[in-house]
Amino acid sequence: MSLLLHRITVKRLILELLCCIFLLANEIHSRRGWSLYPSKPIDKFMTITKEDIRMQGTQNCSGFVQVKSNGSWMDICESTFTEKNGFVACRELGCGFLLRFFSEDTDSDSIRSEFQCSGLEEHLRDCPSTPLDTGTTCRSIFLVCGEKPAPPEVTVYPIQSSNVYVGHPYVVKCHVNAPYKVRSFVLWIRDDDDNETTFTLPAEDNTAHFFMPPIMAATLQMHWCLYDFEIYPNTFCSDRRKYVYIEESSYVRLVGTKSRCLGTLELEHMQNWRPVSQQMWGLKEAAVVCRQLGCGSVLHTHTQSSVNERQPVWSFYSDCEGSEGALLSCGSVREGMSASTVHVFCSGLLLPAVISVESRNRTGEDPVLVLSPYTFYINCSVSPQYPGGHFSLVFTGDKTNHTQNQTAVNHTAIFRFDSTEKSHSGIYRCIYHNTVSGHHVSSQSHELSLVVEDAEDIVLDDGLVQDTGRTVCSGRLFVKEGGSQMMIAAENNNWDMRHASIVCRQLGCGNAVSTSKIKLPKVIPMWSFFSDCDGAEAALLQCGVVLPWFSSTAIEVVCAA
């Protein structure tokens, strides 16, 4: 954004420099007795001539207009000359659009007739005309034509502030200084994310005022006005744009505590920070402050009188209804002296809680996938702003909802889930609770979606062709790890009935009946199993790891089911 602002500033300086050069040149020429846009005839003319019409002036497409009458060139009488006549004349001369016209006394003879064009005629002679008396006093017409219609002016007016701030409404004025009547304006707005919005208003005196709603985030916006006019309806014209930076409205703050969302309200005005004082201060005004600071909703507010002497304050005069985005968008301040100050307590004084999942077989982020029956943990934590407090873990599932509570230890609570089941699939969120300055406050984490699926990382193979969906409860033990499924070598010194019972439990095959070692015809790749199991675990790899090995003996398990 800073690079875009730099480019805009450079372009603006160049345009202002060119404007100054133009005005200086015009001033020099004026002092020499003539202007870049002359108001009276001079000796040297540039002439554009068509069959029945011509223009004489100091530059192309600007000058006095003459028409041919009985073989002679004569000025046009201005008595009822309109912008519609001017449009026809500019177009016939190949000069585009009428920008402005005026009249001057000249020594030339004038055509004694009035043209009554609609503006759409191809030639001036095609317009109805009315002869005038020979004694009619006439002034000659000077036209200024251009390739494009007159560009509209775009002006931005902040309301009750010097800049356009986040949360403040503002006004955009579209105006055209032209001799023709504008029908309507379209205000086109594009922000720095290329989002576009348009607004349309009918024109009044070639002007429209667009009252813009507050913008709730800092952004750079480009505004430009388009318009159409009566002679060419639905032909919208524009080539001027206005860049507006919507600034953060950082002129309010809460001071006196460790939290930026709790304390005495101060306001910066005229480059001076002072406490705010108001006799009728209430929840509506405090709600605006909390929203402006990004501190959530208002919990409490009050005015407090100091035992000290009166101090300089900003006296606040309110018209707030409570939903505004910034305090000075619905009120005004002026200097004052008071022993009373405003205090505001917002819900957002706590930073959001954080939720995360830990599991040996956890995958994915949204939703988080954990495997059954492995244990998983949900961690709730919060930044260390205030000591103490507790966490609520709120679960929402397909068939049940429940909440668990734990005291925060080092600003953290860990919730353990053993023997994971499909019923643990659902939405989890952490809520942190605490008491600050005698008020209960809380902050909530984002919602975490968790899905439980069967692990399927161990299987017993009895050597028979397996039917789809059939669980085998006896045979050689295979373990799947890292994309490879292999048997466990029987050389393992730790393997016993404790481990067999875990296998049978994980497969849903009841209790373990026996476990033994079997001899294979040759040495093949296998797993070597390393254990930390006590026999009560829900899954084998929850308490052990496997590493690649080569062996000719394998483990067999027989379960009761």
Image: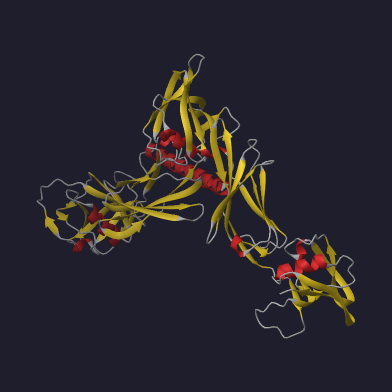
Give coordinates of residue 334: x percent, y percent: 42, 24
Name the image quarter holding the C terminus: bottom right
Q: Is 312 displayed left or right of 383 in the figure?
A: left
| Residue 162 visible to the viewer | no
Residue at the bottom extreme of this rendering: 465
Give coordinates of residue 371: x percent, y percent: 67, 65
Give coordinates of residue 38: x percent, y percent: 33, 45
Q: Is residue 218 above or below residue 542?
A: above
Q: Nearer the viewer, residue 364 or 486?
A: 486
| Residue 74 visible to the viewer | yes
Q: Is 128 displayed left or right of 256 in the figure?
A: left
The image's colouring method is secondary structure
Residue 533 found in image quarter: bottom right
Residue at the top extreme of this rendering: 309
Give coordinates of residue 207: x percent, y percent: 30, 46
Looking at the image, which residue is at 21% across and 53% down?
Answer: 76
Residue 232 found in image quarter: bottom left
Q: Is residue 437 above or below residue 311?
A: below
